[in-house]
Amino acid sequence: MIINSKIIPLPPVDWGGGDVRDVVVLEITTPDGITGLGSAYTGVSQLRDALDQYQQDPATLHEADAEMIVPMSAIDIAFWDIRGKKENLSVSELLGGRKHDRILAYATVDLPMTSAPVGNAFDKILRSVVDQGFRAVKICIDKFGHRNSSKTDKEWDRFEANLLRIARKIVGKNIQLMLDVYGSDPEWPGDFDWALKTSRVLEELDYLWFEEPLAPAAFEDFVRLTQVANVAIAGGEDFILLKDFEKLSDRKAVNILQPDCTRVGGLTQMQSIRNSASRNNINLIPHGWSTAVGLAADLQFQATVSDDKFCMVEFWPHRTIRDLLKHDPFALDNDGRITVPTGAGLGVELNSVVYSKSSRSLATPSRISSSP
């Protein structure tokens, strides 16, 4: 039962290409005075509707329709936080036991498409991220794969491969690199042949994964690509329903699933998605960089993973991450890892000084394109 709830609207998150999404933090207080934090990619009114539905029928928390799953995510995460505090256990212990005390963090960076990457913004952005202590970086190059008539296909092949090669040279061989090409963009032109050629370049340069190389509707091509590519294929960030993740898993359409706990129904649904992935020997790496509460949930979730290679979280050091919580719990260590909070529940607390003020004082977040 909920006795009180507080919804904190945060600055909308810019996913790029004009796709700006609302995001909120939820604080729930139970009748015995225990508080829990949650977060979701939704608006204030939608979360209020979800809270009303839950109060009328608690079963709707895990039986919501597609429209309500996203706001219900915040409620689910908050209840995991509350349960941990009641039992004096961390969420990772509740989810099956902590296997990692530190989790590798990767930064997502937007880079310009350029014919002269060395010494310009392309170069400086990548170096700044490494200088901040990241040991894993996912690059998103503006208009990568969007070819025009200014070059022949072979010239484009060489041009794109050169950008990937220079990115590897800039960060060095000891930094994990990944490529995201936003295949979920409605105007995405890349087809199977392009994706396969690009995957071979990524393999040669030791990139860890290739994210959204095809449009979501090209399901059979995803299956084919995953079968023949020698670099891991990742996807699923735009899916919400469990059945869609189960289809990706059962058909082995990707090597890495990327659900977002603040969109798919919270940690309960994340567990179900992981179970489906595990049955098919597919890895799961949470997609998420919206709020500090979402990151705290991702850290607890990933702390239960047995595999080390793909035990990672996406970390985006904007003010809405750094300032939301007390004690800066997400500092990178010398290995580019974040220590998983050890307190009960999610192990984090709201910074009441910062968030007693209007959240509108913070800038609209976006992926890293310069030093934060």
Image (spheres, helix red, strand yellow):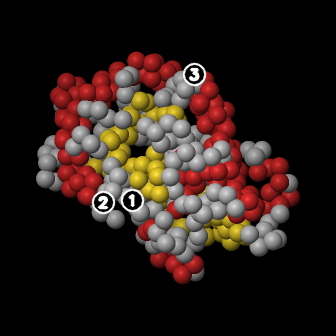
Give the crowd class for mark 3: few <14, some 14-19, many >=20 residues within 10 Å.
some
Quarter where residue 210 is shown = top left
Q: 96 and 48: which one is in front?
A: 96
* Mark 1 vs mark 2: in front: 1
The answer to whether 87 appears left or right of 325 in the picture is right
Q: Mark 1: which amino acid?
A: Leu
Kindly indicate whether the residue at mark 2 contacts the one at mark 1 (C-beta within 8 angstroms): yes
Q: 112 and 81: which one is in front?
A: 81
Give the crowd class for mark 1: few <14, some 14-19, many >=20 residues within 10 Å.
some
Q: At 34% across and 65% down in the image, what residue appears?
A: 372
Kindly indicate whether the residue at mark 3 contacts the one at mark 1 (C-beta within 8 angstroms): no
Is residue 45 something one can see in this rendering? no
User: Circle 1 is placed at which residue position?
Assistant: 332
Structural distance between the alpha carbons of marks 3 and 2: 39 Å
Measured from the top left, where is residue 340 in percent x and y?
Answer: 52, 56
Measured from the top left, where is residue 286 in percent x and y?
Answer: 52, 45
User: Circle 3 is placed at which residue position?
Assistant: 251
Measured from the top left, where is residue 115 in percent x and y?
Answer: 15, 43
